[in-house]
Amino acid sequence: MALTSILNVRYRGLASCVPKNVVSNFDCPPEQRSERERLVRNIGIETRRICHSWQCFSDLAVVAAEKLLVELGWERDDVDALIVVTQSPDYLMPGSAILIQDRLKLRTSIPAFDINLGCSGYPYGLYVLGSMLTSGAIRRGLVLVGDKSAWLPDSLLPLFSDCGTATALEYDTNAPPMHFDLNSDGSGYRAIMMPVGGARERTDFYHFNPQNAEGSEKRRPVDLILDGAAVLNFSIARVPVAVKQICETAATPLADIDYLVLHQANRMINETIRKKLGLAAEKVPSTLHEFGNTSSASIPLTMTARIREDLTLNGRKSLLCGFGIGLSWASCILETDRICMPALLEA
Amino acid sequence: MEDFDNFVANFTSAVDFQEEREIRADTKLADLPEWDSLAALGVIIMFDTEYGVTITGGDLKACPTISSIFELIQARRK
C-alpha cells in the first residue's frame, strides 16, 4: 500500500513479558553437539523462553498490560479499545481480546477484537489502533501482541520462542505523525502455514501420524509447515526495498533513523537485510541469541530488551519492520519521546 | 566466466562445514553430511549477495553435484 500517516496519536508505553522457563538449543545429546553448534552459529539463536504447558500467550500479555497500566497511571476505565494480535489464541473461538477485556477488568463498553497476523503483526496493530484513535472519538487504547510457539515439529523447535507484549497509544494533538507501509502477498501462503485444524481441513486422528508430503521428509499434518528457502527469498527481496521505500515516501533519510528494529526471524535473514541496507550493527538491535523468533512480539521485545533505556530517556526515531507468514510485511516510522517502558517482565 | 575455485571458497563458507571436506566439481551433494536445509539457506544467500542471482530451494534440490550448482550462476545470469 502507499504510505499512510496517522496524526494525533502518541506512542505512550510498551511492556514485554517472557516465560521464566529458559530452554537452551545446546540441550541435546552429546553426539549432536557439533551439529547444534553449527545450527546456533547460523540461526543465531542459543536460548529461548518457552511457556509451561498451562501457560498461554494471553497470560504473558496480561502481565505486560497490568504492569504498563500501573506505570502509566492509567485507570482501567481509561482504556477505550483493546486489540490483540496473535496466532495462538486461548481458544479457536471466541477471540482472546474479549477474554482479556474481562481479565483486565476493562469497561464492557469498549471494542475488543483479535487480528490474525504473525511476524508482520506489530506495525499492523499500531496502525489499526492508531486509526481508531486519530479522530479523538476515543482517547486511549492498548494493543497486545505476541505468540506462544505451538504445533512445531522437532526440526523447528530451535527457532521459536514465546512472548507477550502490551503497547499503549493515546490521542494527542501534539504527537508527531506515525508513518506506515502495509503489504500482503497471499500467493505465498504455503511458505508458513498450519494446514490442518481450520475449516478447510478439520483435525482428524490420522493427522497425528507422520506422513510423506509431496515426496519430502515425513511430517505430521497437524504441525506447522515452514519453507525456509521461500521465506528467506521473500524476506531478503522484500524487506530492504520496503525499508528504503518508507524512508523515501516519509521524507526521512535512513541515516536519520536511530534504530531499525526488524522482526527477529533468524541471523542469516536479518544479517543479509542489514548488510543490504548498509547499516551498522548498533543501529539494528537483535534479541535472537537470547530470545529466538517470538513471532509478532519480536519487534516490541527487542525494543524492551535492547534499547529500553535510550527510549525511556530520549526522543528517538525508529523504523520497525515485520515480515513473514501470510506472506505479509509491514513497516512503520515511529518518533517517540521518553516512552514509559518497564523492564523486561517474566511470568 | 566465474572462477570455480572462488565459487568453491564461497560455497564452503556458505555451507559452514563442521569438518574439512574436499570439494571437487564432481562431488555429489548427497555425499556431503552437511548438505541440509541450513546449507541450502546459506547457498541461497551466497547466490544473492555474491552473484546477484535469486535461486529457490527447488533449484538446489535439482542439483546433483557441485558443478551443477556452479552452472546455475552462468545460466541465471543470462
Image (spheres, helix red, strand yellow):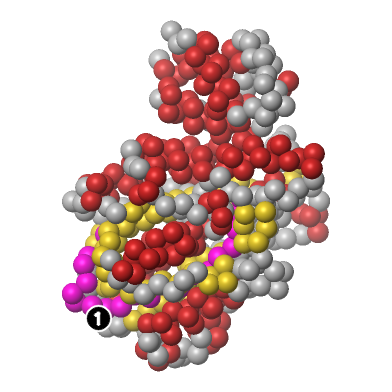
Q: Residue A296 placed where, x, y %?
A: 49, 60
Residue B28: tell me if it is visible: yes
Element at label 1: loop
Indicate whether A79 appears above or below A122. Answer: below
Indicate whether A114 appears above or below A98. Answer: above
As rendered, which of A32 and A12 lies closer to the eye? A32
Say if the magenta span includes residue B32. Answer: no
Label 1 is found on which chain of the structure?
A
For the point 67% across and 58% down, which residue is it? Answer: A23
Q: On the image, which quarter does residue A21 sit in?
A: bottom right
For the point 56% across and 55% down, which residue is it? Answer: A290
Q: Residue B10 placed where, x, y %?
A: 52, 21
Q: Residue B59 placed where, x, y %?
A: 56, 25
Packing grade of label 1 (10 A; few <14, some 14-19, many >=20) is: some
For the point 38% across and 87% down, which residue is it? Answer: A74
For the point 45% across and 11% down, which residue is it? Answer: B2
The residue positioned farthest toward the top in the image shown: B1
Indicate whether A146 appears above or below A59. Answer: above
Determine whether, in the image, residue A117 is placed left or right of residue A192. Answer: left
Determine whether, in the image, residue A14 is placed left or right of residue A339. Answer: right
Say if the magenta span includes residue A172. Answer: yes
Residue A180: tell me if it is visible: no
Please state the extent of the stretch shown in magenta in the rendering: A159-179
* Residue type, numbered disc 1: Gly
Q: On the image, which quarter does residue A126 sit in?
A: bottom left
On-image quarter of the C terminus of chain A: bottom right
Q: Which residue is mark 1?
A: A136
Q: How many marks?
A: 1
